[in-house]
Amino acid sequence: MALTYILFQVAVALLAIVSYYLHRKLTFFKRRGIPFETPHPIRGNMAELKKTKNFHQIFQDHYDKFRESKAPFVGFFLFQNPAAFVIDLDLAKHILVKDFSNFSNKGIYYNEKDDPISAHLFNLDGPQWRLLRSKLSSTFTSGKMKFMYPTVVSVADEFMTVMHEKVSKNSVLEIRDLVSRFTVDVIGTCAFGIKCNSLRDENAEFLYFGKKSFVDQRHGTLVNGLLRSYPKLAKRLGFVRTPQHIQDFYRRIVTETVAVREKENIKRNDFMDMLIEMKNQKEMTLENGEVVRGLTIEEVLAQAFIFLIAGFETSSSTMGFALYELAKNPYIQDKVRAEVEDVLEQHSQQFTYECTKDLKYLNQVINETLRLYTIVPNLDRMAAKRYEVPGHPKFVIEAGQSVIIPSSAIHHDPSIYPEPYEFRPERFSPEESSSRPSVAWLSFGDGPRNCIGLRFGQMQARIGLALLIKNFKFSTCSKTPDPLIYDLRSFVLGVKDGIYLNVEAV
């Protein structure tokens, strides 16, 4: 009886402690006088996630609610994690560029010990991120892009052959699937020297697992919320985020590729070569006392994984959404086609690295697509030290606090982009672009932690779209979705039932 009473008291005490802790968390912004929306006690402001809304819509609604508040940031609960939700573009620029040293970390959950594939460049923080970023940056210079260019064009030429074959059999095609096969083959070839054969084989492994990486999850929404709210605790408990079948596939592909290249001394001057070189680097001590060692095979796996899935999804989605808008706006499509034909005529009908720089209107189309259909909804940052917002002394971002910069919502702000849901490439003419703050367009981020693969992604999208528009005319049909229905399961902007368009050879 006495033991039962003691256990009861312990349970009551623990419940009181947990309740007090949760109360302190959920009143974080109220105590500081910062505008916020009352959160769900467990799900925070993410209560509708994957039920009726995706990440994009949740952030958009929150931004729209507080856009006129004049506050530089407002409160947002990422489940139980109180985050500073940035409204003001000046603050966004301070965080991303001017005061980057205080916001270089993201604070996203990763677990290098139990889930090594999660410890990639996109997630990493601290010295690990800085070292990897500086070393991998040399893979994405303009010189390296020029070197890879003929390979991308050869895959694009094969893509055109496949497209002609398909159009001759059926004029209505699911274009989103086809462009994803193209980008998978480009990345497999350029990064790993592997012929994925996705264009010919719709069941190709690379394509299958590339798609699965964005929708298959090991845990449900509540456990993922725990990882976001209590990352240190989750790491101590050994939580693994990546589904096992995703880990197994990429581990097999990467270890086999590394083994073959090292055994046969194969050099291709590509992304995998850079990773192997870093793996075989001898340990050395820098002048500042920092010890630099080579990458483990697990670290090679993680960097290869993020390059594959990030390059595949962002570029293929952008191309699919661009073709959807060009089909709906035939006059814009005709203008792009005229530009491509004119540029090719100036370059003797040869699709060279130099000629893509002259496709200025096509680039405006791509930028407008990335604005209207922002693939990743937000940028994550975390404050290293207590930060008083310049010009707003009452607004303070505490040390260790998460920061959300809602890039997709900013891209749909009518005060920045009038009639934001209209597709208008002229927004990105030199004149209109110069009239906006640089952080008004964040499709690739900004500052020292912007997207490392920006040049590569833009290159493959330009080549693919230029050749598609040169060879084919795209129009809507009875199966074309209007409006698009987005996949609520996906963190990135994914379409639930594909994009069907009518395609005719020019």
Image (tube, rainbow, N blue to C red):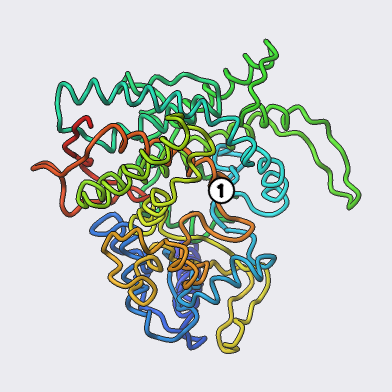
Res. 1 in view: no
Mark 1, residue position? 122
Residue depicted at 58% across the width and 19% down the height: 257
* Figure disc tally: 1
- In the rendered structure, the answer to whether residue 383 lies left or right of residue 342 reads right
Which image quadrant for residue 446? bottom right
Nearer the observer, 342 or 193:
342
Image coordinates for residue 127, horizontal then vertical, percent: 73, 51
Image coordinates for residue 230, horizontal then vertical, percent: 53, 59
Res. 299 in view: yes
- In the rendered structure, the answer to whether residue 133 lies left or right of residue 249 reads right
Which image quadrant for residue 158? top left
Residue 268 sits above or below residue 320 on the image? above
- In the rendered structure, the answer to whether residue 244 lies left or right of residue 39 reads right
Which image quadrant for residue 424? bottom left
Quadrant in which the C terminus is drawn: top left
Image coordinates for residue 55, horizontal then vertical, percent: 35, 58
- Residue extending furthest left? 478
Q: Amino acid at mark 1?
A: Phe
Residue depicted at 53% across the width and 31% down the height: 149
Residue 47 sits above or below residue 354 on the image? below
Label 1 residue SS: loop
- Residue extending furthest right? 287
Nearer the observer, 122 or 505:
505
Quadrant in which the N terminus is drawn: bottom left
- In the rendered structure, the answer to whether residue 320 lies left or right of residue 187 reads left
Residue depicted at 32% across the width and 19% down the height: 201
How crowded pointer 1 is (Cα within 10 Å; few <14, some 14-19, many 20+) is rated as many
Image coordinates for residue 126, horizontal then vertical, percent: 69, 54
